[in-house]
């Protein structure tokens, strides 16, 4: 009996140990995202769409020239769902968006199935200091991001709105030491994430420094964005685009944070003829925590276009130049995972580009004041 009992007990012990070591398929899987909506009201301009060209179609609503958060009354942002899975040294991320903000973010998607894909990539941690990423990821340039859950201000800056949103390609991230990092990438034309329709490529690079109180990143991008630079047979088109971008932010104290974003973007006129065109700008991000649940932040931004720029401001002088100074005051009131963002914004442009009044014929002014209240739930 003893001879039978000892092997039986040993078998039970090994089975229990194996069950403890067994892992579930959910190990390595994470799910996160956000849902947002907002209410917006102009203070100095009408709050409805207006027929400005007499064709009986309501076509214009006064709003800043920046992306997102520009609709009147109660409006929707987006639902954002981020699924990630990692096993060992490899992993994958699927970042899905649905709603008006998501549609605007993936504006160059050419197929209906990809119009909900914000990011879609696989990665390989080849070593402790080198990671390769293959697929579609959000841009490394700029201070702000597409997800409202990661921005302090709900409305976005002009620099973010007219810089890249996303890239598709291959990049390599290098951890040089505990503080310094670098990145190199080869990509499709900016925001062409489904495939490459032009046969030309864009190159990107980044040098970063991170410390206990904050970080600084210097970013560069260079490449033809419409194919004509490398293939004259496609007809008239612009030449190569070059952009250099500085993003930095530091905790100056336990309650006060200061960030900065400065960028310069220029595109060679190429077959179009004339001077190079583009834009440049600078913005500060000052944020103060007044309590554990409420913070206030100020974003002053100066944005200038030359030779027609990117069409952001919408009105230009004889040389195609224009600028805008936008000041945004935002609060962040947190109730658990829900954040309420009341926001006042004033845009002042060098040209009369904001619809001011409508009495049979539209009139325009150089400034626009607005208020919004956003709600962002993060999980």
Image (cartoon, rainbow, N blue to C red):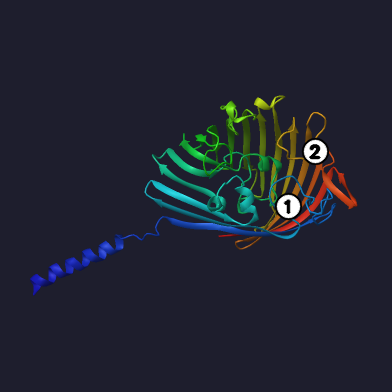
Q: Is residue 31 left or right of residue 269?
A: left
Q: Identify which residue, 49 or 247, lies in the foreground.
A: 49
The furthest residue to the right: 359
Crowd class of label 2 (few under 14; some 14 to 19; many from 20; radius 10 Å): some
Q: Is residue 308 above or below residue 298?
A: above
Quadrant occupied by the C terminus: bottom right
Label 2 residue SS: loop
Residue at left offset 75%, top offset 38%? 302
Label 1 residue SS: loop
Q: Position of residue 151 (x, y in %)?
A: 64, 50
2 or 1: mark nearer the eye:
2
Disc 1 designates what residue? 70
Q: Position of residue 323 (x, y in %)?
A: 78, 36
Q: First in sequence: mark 2 or mark 1?
A: 1
Q: Identify which residue, 208 or 253, lies in the foreground.
A: 208
Q: Is residue 311 left or right of residue 103?
A: right
Quadrant occupied by the N terminus: bottom left
Residue at left offset 31%, top offset 60%? 22
């Amino acid at each position: 009996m003893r001879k039978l009992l000892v092997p039986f007990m040993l078998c039970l012990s090994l089975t229990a140990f194996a069950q403890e070591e067994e892992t579930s398929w959910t190990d390595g899987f994470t799910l996160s995202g956000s849902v947002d909506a907002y209410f917006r009201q102009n203070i100095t301009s009408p709050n409805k769409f207006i027929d400005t060209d007499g064709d009986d179609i309501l076509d214009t609503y006064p709003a800043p020239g920046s992306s997102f958060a520009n609709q009147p009354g109660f409006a929707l942002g987006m639902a954002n769902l981020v699924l990630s899975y990692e096993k060992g040294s490899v992993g994958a991320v699927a970042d899905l968006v649905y709603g008006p903000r998501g549609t605007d973010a993936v504006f160059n998607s050419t197929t209906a199935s990809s119009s909900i894909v914000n990011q879609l990539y696989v990665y390989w941690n080849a070593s402790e200091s080198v990671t390769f990423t293959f697929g579609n990821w959000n841009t490394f340039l700029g201070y702000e991001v597409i997800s409202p859950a990661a921005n302090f201000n709900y409305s976005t800056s002009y620099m973010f709105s007219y810089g890249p949103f996303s890239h598709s390609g291959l990049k390599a991230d290098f951890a040089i030491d505990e503080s310094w990092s670098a990145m190199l990438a080869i990509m499709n034309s900016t925001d062409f994430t489904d495939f490459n329709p032009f046969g030309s490529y864009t190159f990107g690079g980044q040098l970063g420094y991170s410390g206990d109180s904050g970080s600084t990143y210097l970013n560069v991008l260079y490449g033809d964005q419409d194919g004509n630079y490398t293939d004259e047979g496609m007809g008239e088109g612009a030449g190569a685009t070059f952009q250099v971008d500085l993003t930095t932010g530091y905790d100056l104290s336990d309650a006060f944070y200061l960030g900065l974003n400065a960028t310069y973007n220029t595109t060679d006129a190429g077959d179009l003829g004339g001077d190079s065109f583009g834009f440049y700008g600078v913005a500060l991000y000052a944020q103060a925590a007044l309590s554990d649940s409420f913070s206030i932040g100020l974003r002053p931004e100066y944005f200038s276009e030359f030779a027609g720029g990117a069409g952001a401001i919408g009105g230009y002088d004889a040389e195609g130049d224009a600028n805008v100074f936008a000041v945004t005051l935002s609060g962040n009131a947190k109730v658990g995972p829900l954040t309420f963002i009341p926001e006042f914004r004033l845009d002042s442009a060098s040209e009369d580009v904001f619809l001011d009044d409508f009495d049979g014929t539209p009139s325009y002014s150089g400034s626009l004041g607005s208020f919004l209240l956003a709600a962002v739930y993060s999980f």
